[in-house]
Image (cartoon, grey):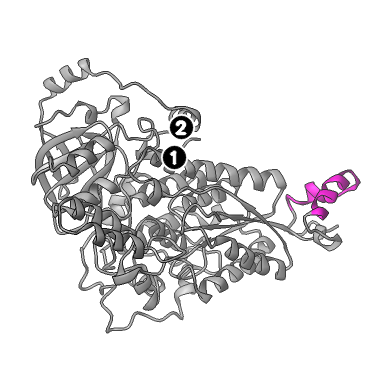
Amino acid sequence: MTNKGRKYSSNIVDGIQQAPSRAMLRAVGFNDEDFNKPQVGIASTWSMVTPCNMHINKLAEEAAVGVDKSGCKSVIFNTITVSDGISMGTKGMRYSLVSREVIADSIETVVAGQGFDGLLAIGGCDKNMPGCLMAIARLNRPSIFVYGGSIQPGKDNTDVISVFEAVGAHSEGKISDVELLEVERKAIPGPGSCGGMYTANTMASAIEALGLSLPNSSAQEAVSQAKKEDSTRAGKALSYLIQKDIKPREIMTKEAFENAITVVIALGGSTNAVLHLLAIAHEAKVELCLDDFMRIGKNVPVLADLKPSGNYLMSELISIGGIVPLMKTLLEEGLLHGDAITVSGKTLAENLKDQNKYSANQDIVRPISNPIRKDSHLRILYGNLAPEGSVAKLSGKEVKFRGVAKPFNSEEDAMEAIMRGKIKEGDIVIIRYEGPKGGPGMREMLSPTAAIVGKGLGNKVAFLTDGRFSGGTHGFVVGHISPEAHLGGPLALVEEGDLILIDAEVNEIKLEVSKEILEKRKENWRRPKEDAVGVLRKYSKMVGSASQGAVTD
């Protein structure tokens, strides 16, 4: 048997002593010729748990065709997924970020355990995409990522965020029971990830800019011929990577991560991209920190008018060419590293060379000369309330907010206050003990932020949390506050009525309470009783700070 491209599988199937291994593999479809081929694990995140992933089994089969036709042997296996959209606002949401680590660990376990020579991973929902990339970086054997694709819009251009905001509108008496039910029934028509520039589409775009997926893999509808073809091409491309022994960490350089950050900013992407890119970089052994986002953000404008802050859905961006024309513009402006290698086997500049620019008559993506924001909407804020940093998202033109603290020790308590009309203009809603360790799991706060928007207070109230915000959240929000309240961070010491200043001009978040008073409060502070069991308890003990990506290894 030849060892060409079979660095790992040869140890599993070669030699007389491995006859039992070969016998097991024959039972799942291997023949004599297959034992001479590089083996490719196809990590499928298919499940009927969520519409984001309900079609990925079909994409995995398309990818397997591409792998097999290129002279390798495909082996499809599954990993888990959970749905943020379904568990949002409940204790179940605590498992969302945890699932990222479980997914990464499970893919590593199968690929390393079975001796696969290459890895093709297909993800569709928020956490399985960074989970796949973390495994790819950790394993560092030829790999490629395929995005499951974006959902088609619902009736009247609605999506899942429309439903969350309709709940707030209903509580305010703005819509009836019948109208709410109509939104609920029509907003999510079928397979695919949530349709705005929320976390799924943000991370898919970041991964493409990182060089780990083929051009425009991030900008295709889930149910489309383009997505089927993308899956097949990815299978074929992986064969080239194996043949040339091009490994992920050769692609995932510091410059590649800077490209990913640049594209996320230009698209007006999710705050979760900060957390996930830090975690992926950690696995790739690339030094990336919060300040890199600020450094890059000073020079990169927001160009895409996409939901949740803007007006358009991902399907509409797809219709004008996806993100490739955007990347071409950014490259021409000197904002991308064109010499970064990609999984196509070409550099980023080579991938973009013959691509078209956007048509002049579209208004979804602005020209550089007329940006939505001249610099990043993602801001890293420091101050006495966030000594280790926090991540703010500026959805509008606002850069400052000074208001009165309304602290809550859980998302549920905050949501109850919002629905009962206890939050007023000028309030700063604080949801604490929701950090990586304290949640545990760092829940997303879409339910309360969407309810506030639905009540018409979206630009009149600010939110602070040591948890996270959904990519669908918009407004004046600051999350990932570190150190978290569970560790006795300053957020734990805030009392109702305290004044807080959020200033994105100088990137500061300040609790306007004297040091002496805070020290006295610290003496009296007691950590709330912990109730985590099972995987949540394990996670709580292992997880690090959100300021470093909330990683567990």
Q: Could you classify mark 1 by the number of other residues whose Cα lies within 10 Å: few (under 14), some (14-19), or many (20 or more)?
A: many
Q: Which residue is mark 2?
A: 536
Q: Could you classify mark 2 by the number of other residues whose Cα lies within 10 Å: few (under 14), some (14-19), or many (20 or more)?
A: some
Q: How far from the left and from the top, in percent, is residue 125?
A: 45, 55
Query: In the displayed image of the protein, which residue is found farthest to the right?
Result: 16
Q: Secondary structure at mark 1?
A: helix
Give the position of the N terminus as an image quadrant. Answer: bottom right
Q: How far from the left and from the top, in percent, is residue 264?
A: 35, 59
The residue sitting at 24% across, 62% down in the picture is 179
Q: Secondary structure at mark 2?
A: helix
**Where is residue 514, by image quadrant?**
top left
**Residue 303 located left or right of residue 59:** left
Q: How far from the left and from the top, in percent, is residue 525?
A: 23, 19
Q: How far from the left and from the top, in percent, is residue 210?
A: 46, 59
Residue 525 colored in magenta in the image? no
Task: Please name the amino acid that badge 2 sits on.
Answer: Leu
Name the one closer to the observer, 129 or 151. Answer: 151
Instruction: Identify the magenta region.
Output: 7-27
**Residue 351 located left or right of residue 478:** right
Q: Which residue is mark 1?
A: 95
Kindly check if marks 1 and 2 are in contact, taking CB atoms under 8 A apart as contact: yes
Task: Specify the principal SS of the magenta part.
Answer: helix
Task: Please name the amino acid that badge 1 sits on.
Answer: Tyr
The residue sitting at 14% across, 53% down in the picture is 459
